[in-house]
């Protein structure tokens, strides 16, 4: 398990340096933006749970994304005590661009000799993540992994 965590951290750091830094994003802000775009409307506690981050970390990430006009925080339509987060058009565009760049880099990594098929590897990691998720739910819709 330790090797899996070290490898994930190394890959994440590499993606931050090679893809995300130019857009002024960290892995956390990228992940939150992609989650918001995938859901279109989502409440902050759900984002934190699905991204596997602390609420305080999410608050900071949402502040950055909101300041850059990539997401909007709004009052819930039916319960004014709750807040929802929605992507802006510029947020959706940036998420799409970055996602394509991350996927291209990922494809390069999996093209190395001896690597398993990317889809097989992603599916195995998704199942593993779902088993460790406290609510037993999925972090992303099946097509978004």
Image (tube, grey):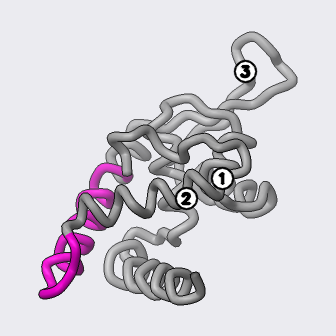
Report whether 54 appears left or right of 73: right
- Labelled disc at residue 133: 1
- Splitting the image into 4 quarters, where does residue 68 fall? bottom right
Report whether 89 appears left or right of 128: left
Which percent across, then down, holds residue 141?
A: 43, 38
> Which residue is located at x 26 percent, y 72 percent?
106
Q: Nearer the viewer, mark 2 or mark 3?
A: 2
Q: Nearer the viewer, mark 3 or mark 1?
A: 1
- Labelled disc at residue 76: 3
Q: Is residue 3 above or below residue 41?
A: below
Which percent across, then down, holds residue 45?
A: 75, 42
125 in the magenta segment: no
The residue that mark 2 highlights is 129
> Which residue is located at x 37 percent, y 51 percent?
145
- Report how far apart the C-alphas of labels 2 and 1 lie in the structure: 6 Å
Report whether 116 appears left or right of 52: left
- Element marked by disc 2: helix
- Number of on-image labels: 3
Q: Is residue 128 above or below residue 46?
A: below
Quarter of the N terminus within the rendering: bottom right
The rendered magenta stretch, by its main secondary structure, is classed as helix
Q: Foreground: 34 or 137?
A: 137
Chain part drawn in magenta: 95-116
Q: Could you tell me if the residues under marks 2 and 3 are in contact, i.e. CB atoms within 8 Å?
A: no
Q: Earlier in the sequence, mark 2 or mark 3?
A: 3
- Report how far apart the C-alphas of labels 2 and 3 lie in the structure: 29 Å
> Which residue is located at x 69 percent, y 34 percent?
43
């Amino acid at each position: 398990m330790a090797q899996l965590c070290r490898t994930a951290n190394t890959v994440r750091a590499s993606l931050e340096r090679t893809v995300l830094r130019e857009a002024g994003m960290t892995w956390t802000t990228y992940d939150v933006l992609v989650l918001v775009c995938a859901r279109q409307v989502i409440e902050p506690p759900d984002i934190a749970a699905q991204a596997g981050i602390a609420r305080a970390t999410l608050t900071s990430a949402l502040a950055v994304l909101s300041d850059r006009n990539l997401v909007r925080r709004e009052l819930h339509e039916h319960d004014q005590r709750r807040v929802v987060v929605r992507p802006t058009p510029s947020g959706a565009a940036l998420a799409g661009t970055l996602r394509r760049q991350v996927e291209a880099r990922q494809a390069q990594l999996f093209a190395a000799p001896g690597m398993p098929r990317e889809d097989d590897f992603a599916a195995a990691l998704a199942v593993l993540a779902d088993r460790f998720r406290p609510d037993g739910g999925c972090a992303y819709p099946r097509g978004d992994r």
